[in-house]
Image: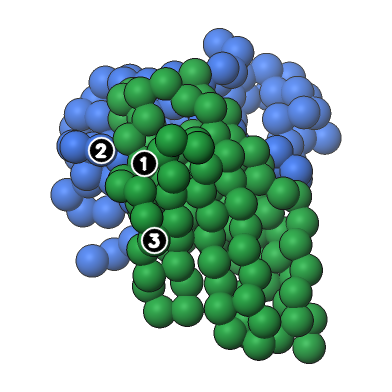
Amino acid sequence: GQSLEQPSEVTAVEGAIVQINCTYQTSGFYGLSWYQQHDGGAPTFLSYNALDGLEETGRFSSFLSRSDSYGYLLLQELQMKDSASYFCAASGSARQLTFGSGTQLTVLP
Amino acid sequence: KAGVTQTPRYLIKTRGQQVTLSCSPISGHRSVSWYQQTPGQGLQFLFEYFSETQRNKGNFPGRFSGRQFSNSRSEMNVSTLELGDSALYLCASSSGTGVTYEQYFGPGTRLTVT
């Protein structure tokens, strides 16, 4: 089976940088994805890491360390619209995604 | 391409009743996964269908079932509803081949059981 741990809440101010961590315990691990969900909305895909290292997509970056079973999502130049829940999700040999319980990010003015 | 659609968007049912939710995936996608989302619980995996066959199943009681049709549309059914079944039910589609890491979610069906 697979389990993922991430903080339940993170707060930061507009313009700042925030890091959301995710640790996982899994068998047959392929990679780590990140999803964003605004209140009342559907989760949307942000990024995927299959290999160790940093992947950058605009203001968002995602990092994976397979040896540490750890990853993080880095959000730079925070904007009010970034206030949302962020989920890490592990891909495994069973071809299904296992999601963490989500991190509620609040961006303050 | 049209996105994933789910019907109905909102539903109110009484304990003991049953309910059927529908999901139409993105055209060409053969995999449909269902999730239950409740506050603080994240997305709990229910099951996944690929080419009309259940390929994966989460840890939910047998009251939760699903099926997939030849056009990849999927339905999930919950029988003998309980208060604790009140949740947002999300379906997500993907190609279903290779490693699954990017899924496209529908807007969800908000189920309230009274």
Q: Which chain is green?
A: A
Q: Residue at x 45, y 60 (%)?
A: A62
Dot 2 and dot 1 residues touching (CB under 8 Å): yes
Q: Residue at x 25, y 38 (%)?
A: B99
Element carrying mark 2: loop
Which quarter of the image is occupied by the N terminus of chain B? Answer: bottom left
In the picture, measured across the screen, residue A81 lies left or right of residue B85, that is: left
Residue A27 in the image: state x and y as whole percent: 42, 21
Which residue matches tag 3? A54
Residue B98 in the image: state x and y as whole percent: 19, 37
Q: Amino acid at mark 3?
A: Leu
Which residue matches tag 1? A31
Neighbour tally class for label 3: few under 14, some 14-19, many 20 plus, Cα within 10 Å: some
> Of circles 2 and 3, which is in front?
3
Pointer 3 indicates a residue of which chain? A
Residue B40 in the image: state x and y as whole percent: 75, 43
Tag shown at residue B99: 2
Q: Amino acid at mark 2?
A: Val
Neighbour tally class for label 1: few under 14, some 14-19, many 20 plus, Cα within 10 Å: many
Which quarter of the image is occupied by the C terminus of chain B? Answer: top right
On screen, residue A55 above or below B97: below
